[in-house]
Image: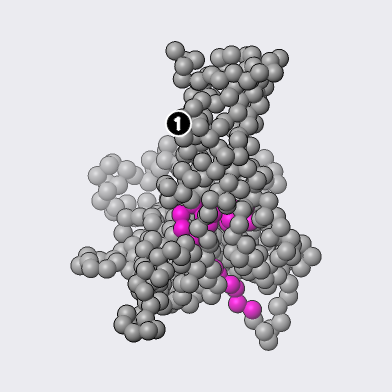
Amino acid sequence: MSNIDDNMNNKNIDGNGSKEHEDYEEVCYLCRRPESKVGKMIHIPNQISICSDCMQKTFDTINKGDNPYLQMMGFSPSMMNLSNLQNEIPQAQKLKKSKTEEEVEPEQFDKKSIPSPHIIKASLDEFIIGQEHAKKVISVAVYNHYKRIGTMIDSEVEIEKSNMLMIGPTGSGKTYLVKTLAKLLNVPLAITDATSLTEAGYIGDDVESVISKLLQAAGNDVKKAERGIVFIDEIDKIAKKRNTNSRDVSGESVQQGLLKLLEGSDIEVPVGATSKNAMVPLTTVNTQNILFICGGAFPDLDKIIKTRLNKQSSIGFKADLKDKHDADLNLISKVNLDDLREYGMIPEFLGRLPILYTLEGLTKEMLVQVLKEPKNAILRQYQKLLAMDEVELQFDPEALEAIADKAIEKKTGARALRAILEELMLDIMYEIPKDDNIGRVLITRDYIEGKGVPLIEMRGSAQAKRLSAKNSAG
């Protein structure tokens, strides 16, 4: 027991007294409760901390001497050696300490530090093409949200948070919009996928794992995580299942489990893991000031909208034609809550997402802009790669239109642009490093359509030579 007494006054696990370790709570090795819950820890060798309750229970069990498992192993109180726990030490798990009332710092998001909606939108314009309405809605919602938690709220007027639901076809920029927004605001962001969520007790992630990922993004700082943003993608995948006799553990039950998170409540979440178990410490996070943004493509939702719009009789002078809305590329913008309930979203869930907006499908002109205008445009990325080999890469305007036409055929939005360019640039990126005399490469429409080859200009030569990367390989 002398080893225990020597370590009783040691406040840091490693004994170096550094500020870094003072900022984190110790966790009991046995019950996994933090120091703020159980009080002062008892330190034993091999960097093990045990709370007084667990230590007393351990001594009581050993002193009784009537434990059949201990007797079967030939264990006696005199044989106790706590250093045998060395091989059982789990990975160190740290939890940021909660500050006392005297130590609480002012809120990080004060009114002056929050950018105005027009500034947020202008920053989004540099990275995202089109989607003017969506960018305006999300800028105002985020501004009002952080203004709400960053200023003193009048007790007579309680401002509720504005969770959002955005709907848009695949490749329209839903996830990219949220990622860009989080970078501009410099706040913790957790992006999770609703397809992995299941009802508690079944294989999969519990709904609390959403907050656990946000806590991890905030460096296990609870106060910082409570002002973060959570983006739940593929939210349409938890719609109620139809025509099934099995238990719906990943549909309606998950929507019901998310209600308490969206509304705002104290959630017990595991630290450093996505599921609760005996070896993982738990902490409490309040979701009252966490902004939730849900997004999904909602495939076949346009059919439900079309059915609602065509409810008038098909006979008579005022009848609507059945194919009246077939040519409407942005039919999804006419969505309402009744359509989403018909799709399989429960009313309680939709009621906690008061802001509903849609993203437009990308047109040919928008795809061409996506190729060349954003700060990190795809063409600029390839030009940067070839510039490292001292080669200039250029695209003919007609070639960009041909790439956009191919992307529209794939029906996967902006994601198709990367796939098309990866295929087109493969031979060029393979052949260019072979010849140090190549100075410029021009991609033409004929090359995109498979009717020709790129124009390659040699260094010091004013005349462009038609060379094929595939023929050069031979």
Q: Residue furthest bottom?
A: 156
Q: Residue 281 at what x, y percent from top left?
A: 48, 54
Q: Residue furthest front?
A: 317
Q: Nearer the viewer, residue 350 or 50?
A: 350
- Residue at 67 percent across and 40 percent down: it is 16
Q: Residue furthest left?
A: 245
How many numbered marks are there?
1
Q: What type is the residue that disc 1 sits on?
A: Gly
- Residue at 38 percent across and 55 percent down: it is 196
Q: Quadrant of residue 228?
A: bottom right
Q: Residue 270 at what x, y percent from top left?
A: 47, 56
Residue 264 appears in view: no
Q: Is residue 85 above or below residue 427?
A: below
Q: Which residues are magenta?
A: 159-181
Q: Residue 395 at what x, y percent from top left?
A: 60, 34
**Going by the image, does 405 lie left or right of 244?**
right
How packed is label 1: few (under 14 Cα within 10 Å), some, or many (20 or more)? Answer: few
Q: Residue 50 at what x, y percent from top left?
A: 50, 52
Q: Is residue 142 above or below residue 69?
A: below
**Going by the image, does 375 lie left or right of 240?**
right
Work out which quarter of the rendered image holds the C terminus and state it.
top left
**Magenta residue check for 418:** no
Quickly name the residue at label 1. 450
